[in-house]
Image (cartoon, rainbow, N blue to C red):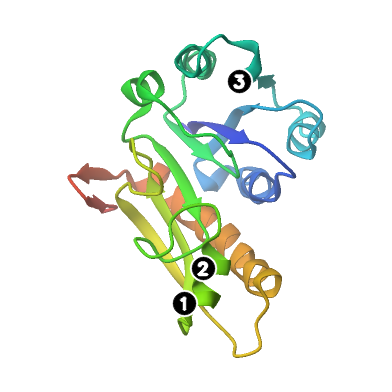
Amino acid sequence: MSARLVVLVSGSGTNLQALLDATGDASYGARIVAVGADRTDIEGLRRAERAGIPTFVVRVKDYETRDDWDAALAAKVAEYEPELVVSAGFMKLAGKAFLELYGGRFVNTHPALLPSFPGMHGPRDAIEYGVKLSGVTLFVVDEGVDSGPVVAQAAVPVEDDDTVDALHERIKRAERQLLVDTVGRMVREGFTVNGRKVTIP
């Protein structure tokens, strides 16, 4: 029995595409049952539609408050009964209602080795700080910004002549691989979240 995944996107959907490619193999252990977004007319939604996967859009501006939007997003995701929700470049923070439903079952990636360089500019901050290693983190989303328990990480060296774009591109390649590999293990083998420790047997 394949695990049910809902994937949330905000842009081009390259991480989504990596998951679409992986879930095309029955041995992966999961299938994407819906793709949601906070914006219309994005490539991520088109990727899902080309793959024949249902899509939905829940826009912040269509709701009076951010809490109302969060509750609507949670309700829409719940319609698809996912075992795991994956943020694949989803650029909105989940709120209380969403985390009440999916806390411990909602994962996201970040282009740095957390807890270093959280926030919107991980690759830039890594270069400005002068670190020799950056990378990508897959983590369980909590109430904070890039502060949840770490599931997996992959290191990416920072070259002496790196630009932000060049480093970010190498991190994104590592990110897609880490996301596919780790989500596959999570759905096939199970996982537990105990405080800040995430264990995949």
List the residue tagged with mark 2: 125
The residue tagged 3 is 60
Query: With 92 as the anchor, is 39 left or right in this view?
Result: right
Write the residue at 24% across / 43% down: 192
Instruction: Residue at 78%, 29% (x, y): give it.
Output: 49
Q: Is residue 45 above or below residue 172?
A: above
Q: 69 left or right of 50?
A: left
Nearer to us in this view, 103 or 97: 97
Cα–Cα span, label 3 and label 2:
28 Å
- Which residue does the numbered mark 1 point to in the structure image? 129
Where in the figure is residue 8, as x and y percent of width and height? 58, 33
SS at circle 3? helix
Relative depth, front residue between 82 and 107: 107
**Which numbered circle lies on residue 35?**
none
Q: Residues at badges 2 and 1 in contact (C-beta under 8 Å)?
A: yes
Image height of 132 relative to 120, above or below? below
Instruction: Give 130 or 113, whichever is nearer the viewer.
Output: 130
Callout 2: SS: helix
Q: Amino acid at mark 2?
A: Asp
Residue 165 % position (x, y): 70, 69
Q: Viewed as shown, does residue 198 lie left or right of 164? A: left
Within 10 angstroms of label 1, few (less than 14), some, or many (20 or more) residues? few
Mark 1 / mark 3, whichever is N-terminal: 3
- Three-letter code, disc 3: Val
Answer whether residue 17 is visible to the viewer in this image.
Answer: yes
In the rendered view, tell whether residue 61 sits above or below residue 20: above
